[in-house]
Image (spheres, grey):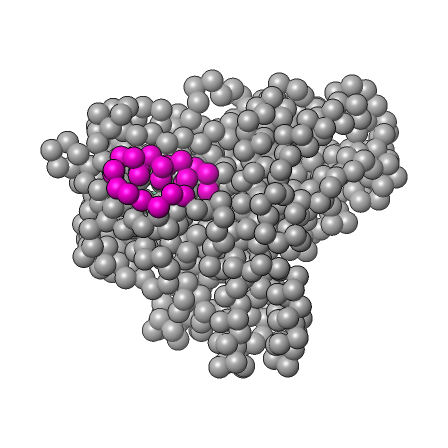
Amino acid sequence: MKRQPTELEQRRFDVVIIGGGITGAALAFDAADRGLVTALIDKGDFGAATSAASSKLLHGGLRYLQNLAFGKVRESALERMYFQNLVPHQTRYVPFVVPTYRGLSRGRALLSAGMLAYETLCLGQNRHVRDRGKRVPSGRSLTAAEVRNVIPGVRASGLTGGRLFYESHMHSSERVTLAFIDGAARKGACVANYVVSDRFLLEQGRVVGVQATDRLSGHRLTVRGRLILNAAGPWIRQLNEQLGGRTLSGIVTGFSKGAHIVTRPLTAGHAVALPTQRRNQAVIHRGGRHVFIIPWRGKSLIGTTYGPYEGDLDAVGATAADVAELIDDVNAALGPQTLSPDDVLYSYAGLYPLVQADIDPEVYQGTGDYQVVDHEAVDGVPGLLSVFGAKYTTARLLAERTLDLVSRKLGDDLSPCRTRKLALPAGEIVDLDRFRAERYEQYRDLLSAQQVNHLITAYGAAADSVVALAQEVPELIEPLASDRDTLALEAIWATRHEMAVHLEDFVFRRTGLGTLGDPGTEALRRAAEIMGGELGWDTERRNEEIERVAARFAA
Ligand SMILES: Cc1cc2nc3c(=O)[nH]c(=O)nc-3n(C[C@H](O)[C@H](O)[C@H](O)COP(=O)(O)OP(=O)(O)OC[C@H]3O[C@@H](n4cnc5c(N)ncnc54)[C@H](O)[C@@H]3O)c2cc1C
């Protein structure tokens, strides 16, 4: 992928997508695959906003069962399946444990009935999975002793056992978003990060493009398209407000902030949903809202808080209060000494756009409802669609539905949607276990098995090309920090092939160097030196880049 923003001005596009989160990324891939001349711009780095701030679950939608939203459960289960084909290298199944207690609401009978309904709704969830190793494993019941064994500290009084089921978890939602954008670029889409859409271009009442700014060069760009797709997530409303309130029907009514923390590992490889005292927007309650502890990259990923957010959309972060809330919830469930602030390695937060008038304002849980608004049909403003993503898991489906509409509106003879069957270029691996075993053998003289595994998980089928780079620069086959997998040579790869233009792009999104907490000054200095060598940074620029990253850890 090469960043060539001037192309944005030189070409006339069928669709111009504003926003490079998972919604825009999935739209771009589907659009380019159907043969549309596609542009995608993001005002920051790809996937840096909500799509980086998720719990990273590609989930079967068990939560929706509590609201009796059966259609949504099935939809989520099927979409989880397609993700196994799109990015098999980035997903793994995590065993989830839900403890059961004496009594009705959190008892065995209710949970078993729920799981039976869930499994029925998920029937066929493995039918189209290409790689047998990526099929959802079967769940089972657990005894109380088994539950105590895998969740140290779980409340023992009244514990009757539990239920184990599997959910799909992404290693890096940031890289999955990038994989869609890369897939779009390989099919001819023109994609650029750090290009902000400043305003819509109007001609005779029709939206015909956007006036944008390349934030790296400062150049103004006019990007023209037959249809403009606003996929700017939490910023959708702000953008549409420029059209004088005419394109706000059905648009975001507020925001709920959700925070996560990354801590030392708390469970023995199992994820757990722990009830809290906080209110839940569910029809069937199992004792308040749940906090999840998910094993992730050797640590625990813990979330989510929910609360109203009315602040600056560009300054969303986990506050000390958010971190304290999560620590309190975990300690209330697993014992008062389980977590302290010192155990918190990293924290982050993102926004759920709330788009329904009937959302309980005291709960602030999103509904998981995605939305496509055709402003020509709804508001009489042709040329513009707003596309809200409500879940990472259903982004592919949202793109399919939007592109079906786009296809009807443009009246072109486009190819039908193929993303239920396709792999993204990085995901073109038919048998992941075999692919891994072959690469361990092939690269054993150059890389350790752990390093090969790391490169395959991060880059999928492109791992071979990364290894080719490693052969050119063997002196850079070394981790940037002793407790992280990221290799020094990845800084070259990210800069040359993945549009990393700032150190933070590399530290937080192209790799997980920073998402387990501060990797240390030396690691940042070294990464800045390598990226700077590629991008021509002088000492002052390198220091600025390092300070920007360090500020994020300090915050
Ligand atoms: C705390 C939390 C946990 C979640 N957990 C899960 C989960 O486990 N599983 C799941 O399926 N879903 C989850 N979700 C939901 C999921 O993360 C979101 O639905 C999804 O990431 C939304 O993606 P998006 O592309 O629509 O928005 P974003 O990722 O926010 O992308 C919008 C993009 O638009 C860009 N943009 C904005 N304005 C402009 C402009 N003027 N010009 C150019 N670009 C612009 C932004 O820079 C941004 O990159 C979670 C959400 C939250 C908040």
Which residue is located at x 65 percent, y 52 percent?
132
Q: Position of residue 363 (x, y in %)?
A: 55, 24
Q: Nearer the viewer, residue 419 or 106?
A: 419
Over which residues does the magenta segment extend?
Answer: 396-417
Q: Position of residue 455 (x, y in %)?
A: 57, 66
In this view, the residue farthest toward the right is: 145
Which residue is located at x 66 percent, y 20 percent?
284
Q: Nearer the viewer, residue 326 or 282?
A: 282
238 shown above or below 347? above
98 shown above or below 438? above
Question: Which image quarter: residue 523?
Answer: bottom right
Q: Nearer the viewer, residue 322 or 103?
A: 103
Q: Quadrant of the N terminus?
A: bottom left
Q: Is residue 185 left or right of residue 465?
A: left
Residue 409 in magenta stretch: yes
Instruction: Tell me if I can see residue 143 in this picture.
Output: yes
Main SS type for the magenta part? helix
In this view, the residue farthest toward the left is: 204
Instruction: Tell me if I can see residue 517 in this picture.
Output: no
Q: Is residue 365 left or right of residue 120?
A: left
Residue 217 in magenta stretch: no
278 shown above or below 32? above
Which residue is located at x 31 percent, y 44 percent?
414
Q: Position of residue 26 (x, y in %)?
A: 42, 46
Q: Position of residue 352 (x, y in %)?
A: 47, 34
Q: Nearer the viewer, residue 530 or 450?
A: 450
Which residue is located at x 21 percent, y 29 percent?
381
